[in-house]
Amino acid sequence: MTSSGSWQVEFPGVGNAVMERLQEVGTLTRVIEKRLSGALGINATDLAAMEHLISEGPLTAKDLADRLRVSTAASTHVVDRLEKAGHVVRRPHATDRRKVLVEPVQESVTRIFGHLQPLLSGLEGLVEALGPEGRDVVENFLTGVVGFYTGTADSLPES
């Protein structure tokens, strides 16, 4: 504790503009997720499930559990909540009668992209403005960031 009685923690990267911008992106990502979840009437885990279903297509509850890093029972609860809220439907697997696929409802996908369109268009414009060499540098940097995030996520205990 400092002499004024408040806690002070020295974070790595303070004073480094790139590290500070990464921190801001992380913070703003959580703000956007919270507000988007609220707009859809779901929680953050349910929103993460929707992101996987939208980007990867229909998935089984087991596949969804693997991607969310939760148990199959927990992912079944996620699917139940999303189905009750009208964001997903369950459909029989085309070739395996034992499996059920979870599929996002088009109206929910449209709603999500409606909220995110300004962000996505703005980011796309920034990427295009970089040019090929700049995009390569940013891609390599972000690939490294993803590697560190993945390693950290894998090393933390699951709840």
Image (spheres, rainbow, N blue to C red):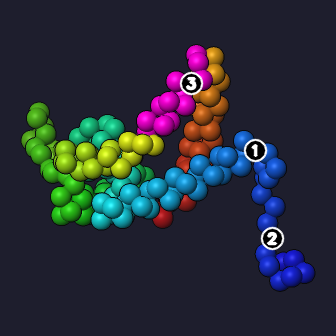
Name the kind of residue labelled 2 in the image.
Gln
Nearer to the camera, 118 or 81: 118
Q: Which residue is mark 2?
A: 8
> Residue 18 location, x and y as percent?
72, 41
Where's residue 28, x and y in %? 55, 54
In the drawing, does residue 26 fall left or right of residue 92? right
Q: Residue at x 10, y 35 (%)?
A: 94
- Left/right placement of residue 7 relative to residue 121 reads right
Q: Earlier in the sequence, mark 2 or mark 3?
A: 2
Local SS, label 2 = loop
Q: Residue at x 55, y 31 (%)?
A: 126
- Name the residue that disc number 1 marks: 17
Magenta span: predominant SS is helix
Question: Mark 2 and mark 3: span between their CA atoms?
Answer: 39 Å
Please tell me whether residue 77 belongs to the stretch shown in magenta: no
CA distance for labels 1 and 3: 21 Å
* Identity, as a three-letter code, of the amino acid under mark 3: Ala
Could you tell me if the residues under marks 1 and 3 are in contact, i.e. CB atoms within 8 Å?
A: no
Q: Find the residue positioned furthest to the bottom.
A: 5
Mark closer to the observer (2, 3): 3
**Circle 1 Cα neighbour tier, 10 Å, few/some/many (<14 / 14–19 / ≥20):** few
- Vertical comparison of 9 with 123: above or below: below
Which one is in front in this view, the residue at disc 1 or the one at disc 2? 1
